[in-house]
Each structure stands twice: as C-alpha cells, then as structure tokens.
Image: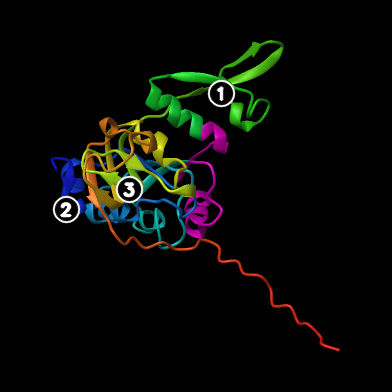
Amino acid sequence: MRKIIVDASQVLAEVLTDGMTIMSGGFGLCGIPSTLIEAVRLSGVRDLTFISNNAGVDGFGLGILLRTRQIKKMISSYVGENKLFAEQFLTGELELEFNPQGTLAERIRAGGAGIPAFYTKTGVGTLIADGKEVRRFGGEDYVMETGLVADIALVHAWKGDTEGNLVYRKTARNFNPMMATAAKLTIAEVENLVSIGEIDPDSVHTPGVFVQKILHVPNPEKRIEQRTVRPTIQVEVA
C-alpha cells in the first residue's frame, strides 16, 4: 500500500516546481489523466513543458492548464480541437514543437528505453528536418530524432494493483504505456484498484517497477470529443 495516495493535489504540490517537463497520456480525450491534470492546476506551478499527443479541448484535459497560462511549451502531434491553443500559439504566447504522431510515440518509447536518438524517414525534406542531422542508409535519407524523457509522467489506467502493475483498456492503451517508462516519477490514476495477484501477469501492460504513485479514481469523467450520430433517414411508405 506504500504507493497509494489519497490526495493528488497534496502529493503533486510536494513534487511540482516551475519549469518542469511533464508527460500526459491519452489520445484526444481517451485515457487522459484528468484528475491528475486538475491537481497540476491547483498546484499553481507555471512555465511547464507538456509532452502529450494533443492539448485536450477548451475547458477540459490540458485545456484547463492552457486557460490558466501554466503551460509554456507543448511537444505534441495534434492540437486541432483546441481554439485556445491555436490562439496562444499564433500570438506567440505558447511555444510548440510539432512532431509526426509516430515520431512522437517513438521518441517517448526511446526515452523510456534509454535510447538517446534514432533515425527515421518521416519528415525528411520537410520543415520537420530543419536543423536536424540527416544521414544516408541504404541509399535513403533519414533524419535523427532524440528520445524524450520527463520529470513526471501522468497516466490513466483502467485497472491497477497496489504495486502499480497497470492494465489499459482498448483505445486508452495509447501513449500511456510508453510515457509510464519515460519519466523520473510516474503517477497513475486507476479506475479499478485491486490487490496484488488479482491481475494475470500476462495481462500487465506497465509493470509496477515503473510506477511510484497510484491514485484510485473509480468514476472518472469521460467526455466524448466529437459526438457523431447517424443522420435521420426519412423512409416513405407506399
């Protein structure tokens, strides 16, 4: 039980400092650590760099930290659902390091695996490659990308035990597993908290050795980013 925390705001207030780099799991609004993000907001820390596939939406997810101007820089892949993000970027208030989505995922995985850099064809000949080393392998050009590591990783899991072994459900198994390995301190919010031994070892996505703190969040808010329904079809009966 030594890893279990009951007050995320208190724990984060003790470890957060201005200027930190934080990874935040999730894809769109799926699998985001919304409770932990709120705790970051309450801490009041500023000038943060966030590594996340996207920046949430206006008023939810990382969007609440954009609203409070606590984020200085985003290292992201997709930010198209957030008007405030676009506004802050276009006015120069927010720094942005854009990455192709696969490159971002591999940079995080590499950081967690202790790999300082790797080469990829993605981005060769585009703005993505500006200022980066390009080398030729097998007659093809490849651009060098560096691994990413963070001071803190915030992740969301569907199930976890008291030692921090985590299981992610369906699409929420996106950036969360790799981020959990790529930070000095990993804090996981878990929907279903169980005792050690209740998770089949073969089902574990993130081993507990990577997780230092666990917060039980049994009923997290799960918003739909883009609600889409089938159009009503009028059928004429003869």
x, y percentage for residue 231?
69, 73
Q: Earlier in the sequence, mark 1 or mark 2?
A: 2
x, y percentage for residue 32?
40, 51
Left or right, 63 with respect to 45, comes to right
Kindly identify which numbered label has been placed on residue 131. Answer: 1
Q: Mark 3 falls on what kind of element?
A: strand
The amino acid on which the numbered mark 1 sits, given as a three-letter code, is: Gly
- Identified at 40% across, 60% down, the residue is 60
Q: Earlier in the sequence, mark 2 or mark 3?
A: 2
Residue 89 on the magenta span: yes
Kindly identify which numbered label has been placed on residue 217. Answer: none
The amino acid on which the numbered mark 2 sits, given as a three-letter code, is: Val
Residue 206, compared with residue 217, is above or below; it is above
Q: Mark 2 falls on what kind of element?
A: loop
Left or right, 73 with respect to 83, comes to left
Q: Earlier in the sequence, mark 1 or mark 3?
A: 1
Magenta region? 76-104
Kindly identify which numbered label has been placed on residue 159. Answer: 3
- Identified at 60% across, 31% down, the residue is 128
Residue 60 on the magenta span: no
In front of the other: label 1 or label 3? 3
Residues at circles 2 and 3 in contact by the CB criterion of under 8 Å: no
Left or right, 140 with respect to 215, comes to right
- For disc 2, the marked residue is 6
If the image is split into quadrants, where does the C terminus sit?
Answer: bottom right
Q: CA distance from mark 1 to mark 3?
A: 42 Å
x, y percentage for residue 143?
59, 21
